[in-house]
Amino acid sequence: MQEIAFTMQLRPGVQAEYQRRHDEIWPELTEALHAAGIREYSIYLNPATDTLFAVQRRLPEHSADQLPTLPIMRRWWAYMADLMLTNPDNSPVVMPLERVFYQA
């Protein structure tokens, strides 16, 4: 299983709305993530800084790199764009993180 981690940034004052939208995540999006080989996806919030910390566990043969081409992914990004810092295509600004320690 491949594991990646990254951060994203919320706009101030939108924490509750971000949580609400994820509580009601679209089934089609969940299906697309699973079909792309993502088996676990967690997002944590640092409420003091509005920073989101995300971790994905992916199958070795994942196709997560193709998710940005899917209409469902682009609709989700557009739906979430008012809550987060985004790129011109509405994808969230993502800062990949390097693992510096692991203990099994």
Image (spheres, grey):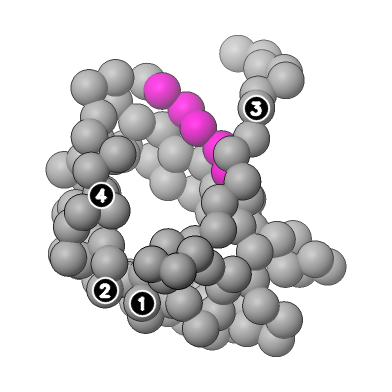
Looking at the image, tell me whether mark 2 or mark 3 is earlier in sequence order: 2
Q: Are marks 1 and 4 in contact (CB under 8 Å)?
A: no
Residue tagged 4: 67
Query: In percent of the image, x 27 and y 62: which residue is there?
Result: 73
What is the three-letter code of the residue carrying label 4? Leu
Q: Are marks 1 and 2 in contact (CB under 8 Å)?
A: yes
What is the three-letter code of the residue carrying label 3? Glu
Q: Quadrant of residue 49?
A: bottom right
Residue tagged 2: 75
Q: Residue furthest front?
A: 88
Looking at the image, tell me whether mark 3 or mark 4 is earlier in sequence order: 4
Under circle 4, the secondary element is: helix
User: For the residue carrying disc 4, how many other residues have a C-alpha within 10 Å: few (<14), some (14-19), or many (20+)?
Assistant: some
Gap in Å between the C-alphas at discs 3 and 4? 22 Å
First to last magenta residue range: 2-6
Q: Vertically, is 43 above or below 23?
A: above
Does residue 23 show up?
no
What is the three-letter code of the residue carrying label 2? Arg
Looking at the image, tell me whether mark 4 or mark 2 is earlier in sequence order: 4
Gap in Å between the C-alphas at discs 2 and 3? 29 Å
Gap in Å between the C-alphas at discs 4 and 2? 12 Å
Q: Are marks 2 and 3 in contact (CB under 8 Å)?
A: no
Going by the image, does 2 lie left or right of 62? right
